[in-house]
């Protein structure tokens, strides 16, 4: 069945982001905008200048002489455990005897001004005994340096499958890391309260992770720590786990000095000290039959995890989950290795290991297509997932939109016509060549770690009829707070301006999962919906009592109670006053846990995802064959949003994710030298897409589908999936380069495809 395609109307009928006013006026409050309390101390962090070694001595003498320096804090000053590791306890807050990467914190200086603190750090004299550094994951693997035992997903019978293949192709595919480059750098502001209680304002995606870790380091119970998050100036995964260290340091400083302590990283320090998307190196083998069916796929992923595990074990898992992208492969054996290296611990980044795995599959298809003499898209289309198939991890493919989005794309933007234009252009031009690539995607929605799939909401209706909502959702620019308003407004049938979304606060909402895995609106939205349904029922009961009718005759609509077949109405405000008189509870706390999902790590099988998101994009690029420069002419996408509850926000996520993914594939060249030093440590040496590097045309079509009940209001998760499209940029560039230089075949498909690499490919 071919689904109807709905155009995006010019006037998108959805709610404007509730933050847009304060954003545009510069009035939104981030950590550095919090009015400063008297006595605030400022922090600078002293970090390792070598990638691996033993600390022989640390001399603070000169620092203490400096005027304005109040305190130096290092591992000796920690009341509890010197440990901040999230999944594995392998990461000290401050290095003790050894250092494992350049930029690893050793101590912090508190001073009366930030300038003094920063200057003071340079007066700390550290002697090291240097040890050899490893930055390459395969070298680490060969030495047996792994964070966790390697993991394998498998399906079918490999030996038998290889024998049935007409074509077998092997190759290598590498992806570099990616700097998150959130506009707001990492930071926190901690306030000491009475009795050793601490409040931490933090720019974190994971308030509970910070609370739990601070409690461990400070050696106090979690209830003495309140983490408060107003909003983030971007996170992209970089603050899922790695906001914790800075919050803990600020809390430690505030505990020791009994003064408020503020810690905000400067951009270059943030780039140097924090982890990024995990670079991967991979090998693959793919087998196809004569009809281009992929019969077998084998891959080994070497994840460059960095010096501590951080979230890398979970990221590794998602690489395996997405190893076959949007394709059905009946025989699969994929193995992933989490390699310990001497660079900062790498971490979550939009897609969470999924993109790294999918790139390898796309590389395998591209190389196979070239060997066989067909277009990649012939192989892609032949192998798209469909209902009744099974993923390598055992989950059945249901409500699959892989073919529907492909056909939707074909219908709106016939690929043949695009190809003809390109062929004609290439025939007529010598110095410019065009290329194209199609990129289907499939992304599983849920934390792969099943227990994390839960959230809560606390809804208060105040006696004047206004409403305050707290959830575990962290607003980081993705618009989740706007979606929460929409959920409550719809269920309680009130105007959106009656509703305020409170900060994310561990005292109001406890034991939160981080805002991550694209699941924030689903998990928290469902909790808000549950709380509002309960409140609605109570209010209807109040009205029924006044009107002496059955509840079933009543409806809550547009701030009125309506009675069936009667002109009688009760206004919202009156209803709330009546509820107060009847002593009805106008607050509700609800808990949502995703049903149906499970996963058995021993068998590596289960049903880990609530649902999947699908889509297909086509990329068109023009390269300048003299200079190696290039411009993307167009990216056209048909995407499965389910029934979008907010087209403006969802379109924003789509465009932002697409361009962020393209940046990773095109230009964001993250370079560590062999001594583990980050060379691309500033915006002058690390290039991200600007307005000139985005495609000249981005055409997004909303696939008209029913959506899935596990998604909030059937509006599918949209945070991470769009980033995956970016992978298409690499293959469009490869196609264009091969138009000019048909002999070009990279030994390793290695993203990003920078203009420099394009130039070398053109003449290589
Ligand atoms: N974080 C996490 C994530 O802890 N588990 C996940 O599965 C995940 N997926 C995407 C992004 N963050
Ligand atoms: Mo994320 S990579 O969903 O924090």
Image (cartoon, helix red, strand yellow):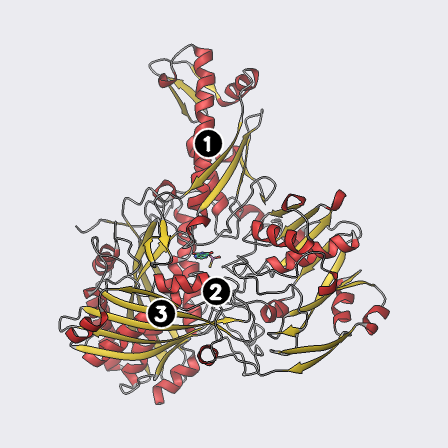
Q: Which residue is drawn at 29% across and 72% down?
A: 298
Q: Is mark 2 on a helix, strand or loop?
A: helix
Q: Does the rendering let one see residue 410? A: yes
User: In the depicted view, which residue is nearer to us: 537 or 763?
Assistant: 537
Q: Is mark 3 on a helix, strand or loop?
A: strand
Per the rendering, the mark at residue 281 is none
Q: Where is residue 733 in the image (x, y as percent from the top left)?
A: 34, 76
Reading the image, the residue beneath label 1 is 532
Name the quadrant containing residue 193: top right
Q: How far apart are marks 3 and 2 (CA)?
A: 15 Å
Q: Which residue of the protein is positioned furthest toward the front in this rendering? A: 602
Q: Nearer the viewer, mark 3 or mark 2?
A: 3
Q: Which of marks 2 and 1 is nearer the N terminus?
A: 2
Q: Position of residue 308 (x, y in %)?
A: 55, 68
Reading the image, the residue beneath label 3 is 335
Look at the picture and state if 427 lies above or below 566.
Answer: below
Name the quadrant containing residue 666: bottom left
Q: Does the rendering let one see residue 727? A: no
Q: Nearer the viewer, mark 3 or mark 1?
A: 3
Left or right: where 70 falls relative to 446: right
Q: How far apart are marks 2 and 1 (CA)?
A: 37 Å
Reading the image, the residue beneath label 2 is 312
Q: Where is residue 284 in the image (x, y as percent from the top left)?
A: 31, 75
């Amino acid at each position: 069945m071919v689904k109807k395609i709905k155009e995006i109307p010019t006037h998108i009928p959805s709610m404007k982001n509730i933050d847009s006013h304060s954003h545009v006026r510069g009035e939104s409050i981030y950590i550095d905008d919090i009015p400063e309390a008297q006595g605030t101390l400022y922090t600078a962090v002293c970090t390792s200048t070598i990638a691996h070694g033993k600390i022989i001595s640390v001399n603070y003498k000169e620092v203490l002489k400096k005027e304005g320096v109040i305190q130096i804090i290092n591992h000796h000053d920690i009341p509890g455990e010197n440990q901040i590791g999230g999944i594995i306890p392998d990461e000290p807050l401050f290095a003790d005897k050894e250092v494992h990467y350049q930029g690893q914190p050793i101590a912090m200086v508190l001073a009366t001004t930030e300038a003094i603190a920063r200057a003071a750090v340079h007066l700390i004299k550290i002697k090291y005994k240097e040890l050899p550094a490893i930055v390459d994951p395969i070298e680490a693997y060969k030495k047996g340096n792994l964070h966790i035992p390697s993991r394998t997903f498998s399906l079918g019978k490999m030996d038998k499958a290889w024998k049935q293949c007409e074509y077998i192709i092997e190759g290598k595919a590498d992806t570099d890391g990616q700097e998150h480059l959130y506009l707001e750098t990492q930071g926190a502001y901690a306030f000491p309260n009475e009795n050793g209680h601490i409040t931490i304002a933090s720019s974190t995606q994971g308030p509970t992770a910070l609370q739990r870790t601070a409690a461990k380091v400070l050696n106090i119970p979690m209830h003495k720590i309140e983490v408060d998050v107003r909003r983030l100036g971007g996170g992209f995964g970089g603050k899922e786990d790695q906001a914790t260290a800075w919050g803990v340091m600020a809390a430690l400083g505030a505990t020791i000095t009994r003064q408020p302590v503020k810690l905000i990283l400067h951009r270059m320090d943030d780039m140097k000290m924090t982890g990024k998307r995990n670079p991967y190196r991979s090998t693959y083998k793919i087998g196809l039959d004569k009809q281009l069916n992929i019969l077998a796929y084998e891959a080994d992923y070497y994840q460059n995890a960095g010096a501590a595990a951080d979230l890398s074990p979970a990221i590794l898992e998602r690489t395996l989950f997405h190893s076959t992208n949007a394709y059905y492969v009946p025989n699969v054996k994929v193995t992933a290795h989490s390699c310990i290296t001497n660079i900062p611990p790498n971490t979550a980044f939009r897609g969470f290991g999924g993109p790294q795995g999918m790139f390898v599959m796309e590389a395998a298809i591209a190389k196979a297509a070239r060997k066989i003499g067909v277009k990649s898209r012939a192989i892609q289309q032949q192998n798209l997932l469909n209902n009744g198939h099974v993923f390598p991890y055992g989950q059945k493919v249901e409500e699959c939109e892989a073919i529907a989005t492909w056909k939707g794309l074909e219908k709106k933007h016939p690929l043949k016509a695009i190809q003809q234009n390109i062929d004609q252009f290439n025939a007529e031009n010598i110095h410019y060549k065009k290329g194209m690539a199609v990129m289907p995607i499939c992304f599983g929605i849920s934390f792969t770690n099943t227990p994390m799939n839960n959230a809560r909401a606390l809804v208060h209706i105040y006696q004047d009829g206004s409403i305050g909502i707290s959830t575990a959702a962290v607003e980081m620019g993705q618009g989740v707070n706007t979606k929460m308003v929409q959920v409550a407004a719809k269920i309680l049938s009130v105007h959106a301006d009656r509703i305020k979304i409170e900060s994310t606060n561990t005292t109001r909402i406890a034991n939160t999962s981080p805002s991550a895995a694209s699941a924030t609106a689903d998990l928290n939205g469902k909790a808000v919906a549950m709380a509002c349904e309960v409140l609605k029922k109570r209010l209807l009961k109040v009205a029924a009592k006044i009107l002496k009718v059955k509840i079933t005759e009543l409806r809550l609509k547009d701030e009125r109670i309506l009675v069936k077949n009667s002109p009688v109405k009760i206004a919202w405000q009156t209803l709330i006053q009546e509820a107060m008189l009847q002593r009805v509870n106008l607050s509700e706390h609800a808990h949502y846990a995703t049903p149906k999902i499970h996963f058995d790590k021993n068998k590596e099988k289960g049903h880990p995802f609530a649902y999947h998101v699908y889509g297909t994009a086509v990329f068109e690029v023009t390269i300048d064959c003299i200079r190696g420069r290039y411009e993307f002419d167009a990216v056209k996408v048909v995407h499965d949003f389910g029934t979008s509850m907010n087209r403006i926000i969802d379109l924003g996520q789509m465009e932002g994710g697409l361009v962020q993914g393209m940046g990773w594939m095109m230009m964001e060249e993250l370079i560590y030298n062999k001594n583990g030093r980050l060379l691309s440590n500033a915006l002058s040496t690390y290039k991200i897409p600007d307005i000139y590097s985005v495609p000249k045309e981005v055409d997004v079509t909303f696939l008209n589908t029913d959506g899935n009940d596990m998604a909030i209001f059937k509006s599918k998760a949209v945070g991470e999936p769009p980033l995956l499209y970016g992978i298409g940029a690499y293959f469009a560039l490869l196609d264009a380069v091969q138009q000019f230089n048909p002999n070009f075949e990279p030994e390793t498909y290695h993203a990003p495809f920078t203009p420099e690499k394009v130039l070398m490919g053109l003449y290589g």
